[in-house]
């Protein structure tokens, strides 16, 4: 499998994504510039975090209209694996591939710390290998997930809430929901389960020297498909 790591002006987690895929998972991965119009030769996509276009207008709004995103949307609609972390999650929401939006954190401050995640759906490509509470870092100022009541009910009813913020024991508390996301949502899936968006950074938790290897349980989705 060959994974495209999309690069936008302002991306700053693209290298983290590339190295985790190559060095920690042993996959083929290469950068694709936002102005390209083809994903020929690739089978999957990683939309990385950062501050695309300086987070002007809304986070991810300008990047969602980049030329390459038409190809990313096509990939997603064909059922191919697409994951977006942090700004990548914001971008996927702005394209409409995922529902809801990411707003300013409840306390209106940038948050950079480890958080704990509990998997809520173990049937998707991205979550089937997750068997425990994960410890993964976040780094965002606008990561509070919001959606209308109908969307939240649909996500819950269809099993499309991938992760929620919890404490180290897997319990939902006010303190563990660090950015104030509705229903403590940290990540969601599209209706087919092949597209995942989440605010935490699994690519920054892919080796012991980084403080955690828990992110690999999510990224194993790429490798599982490659071995299938």
Image (tube, grey):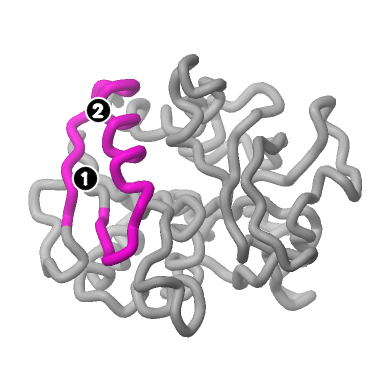
- Please indicate whether residue 177 sits to the left or right of residue 76 in the image: right
Quarter of the figure with residue 167: top right
User: What percent of the width, then of the height, locates residue 147?
Assistant: 70, 73
Q: Residues within 10 Å of mark 1 (few under 14, many from 20)?
A: some
How far separated are the C-alphas under marks 1 and 2?
15 Å
User: What percent of the width, then of the height, locates residue 188?
Assistant: 59, 55
Image point (18%, 48%), residue name: 31
124 or 110: nearer the viewer? 110
Queried whether the magenta region covers residue 215, the answer comes back as no
Queried whether the magenta region covers residue 8, the answer comes back as yes
Quarter of the figure with residue 120: top right
79 or 207: nearer the viewer? 207
Where is the N terminus found, in terms of image quarters?
top left
User: What percent of the width, then of the height, locates residue 138?
Assistant: 59, 45
Image point (87%, 42%), residue name: 172
Disc 1 element = loop
Marks 1 and 2, the one that precedes in the sequence: 2
Q: Residue furthest front?
A: 109
User: What percent of the width, then of the height, locates residue 110?
Assistant: 64, 58
User: Range of the magenta residues?
Assistant: 6-32
Image point (62%, 35%), residue name: 122
- Please indicate whether residue 194 sits to the left or right of residue 213 in the image: left
Quarter of the figure with residue 36: bottom left
Residue identifier under label 2: 22
Q: Residues within 10 Å of mark 2 (few under 14, many from 20)?
A: some
Residue identifier under label 1: 43
């Amino acid at each position: 499998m060959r994974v495209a790591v999309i690069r936008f002006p302002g991306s700053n987690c693209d290298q983290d994504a590339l190295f985790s895929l190559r060095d920690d998972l042993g996959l083929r991965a290469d950068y694709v510039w936002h102005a390209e119009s083809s994903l020929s030769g690739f089978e999957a996509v990683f939309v990385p975090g950062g501050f695309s276009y300086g987070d002007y207008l809304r986070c991810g709004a300008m990047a969602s209209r980049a030329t390459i995103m038409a190809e990313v949307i096509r990939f997603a609609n064909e059922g191919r694996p697409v994951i977006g972390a942090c700004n990548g999650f914001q971008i996927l929401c702005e394209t409409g591939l995922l529902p809801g939006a990411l707003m300013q954190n409840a306390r209106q401050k940038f948050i950079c710390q480890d958080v704990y995640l509990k998997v809520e759906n173990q049937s998707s490509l991205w979550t089937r290998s997750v068997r425990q509470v994960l410890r993964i870092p976040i780094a965002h100022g606008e990561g509070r997930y919001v959606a209308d009541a109908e969307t939240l009910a649909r996500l819950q009813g269809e099993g499309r809430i991938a992760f929620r913020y919890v404490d180290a024991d897997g319990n939902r508390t006010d303190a563990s929901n660090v950015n104030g996301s509705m229903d403590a949502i940290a990540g969601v899936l599209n209706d087919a389960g092949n597209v995942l968006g989440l605010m935490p950074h699994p690519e920054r938790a892919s080796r012991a020297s980084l403080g955690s290897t828990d992110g690999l349980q999510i990224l194993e989705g790429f490798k599982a498909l490659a071995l299938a």
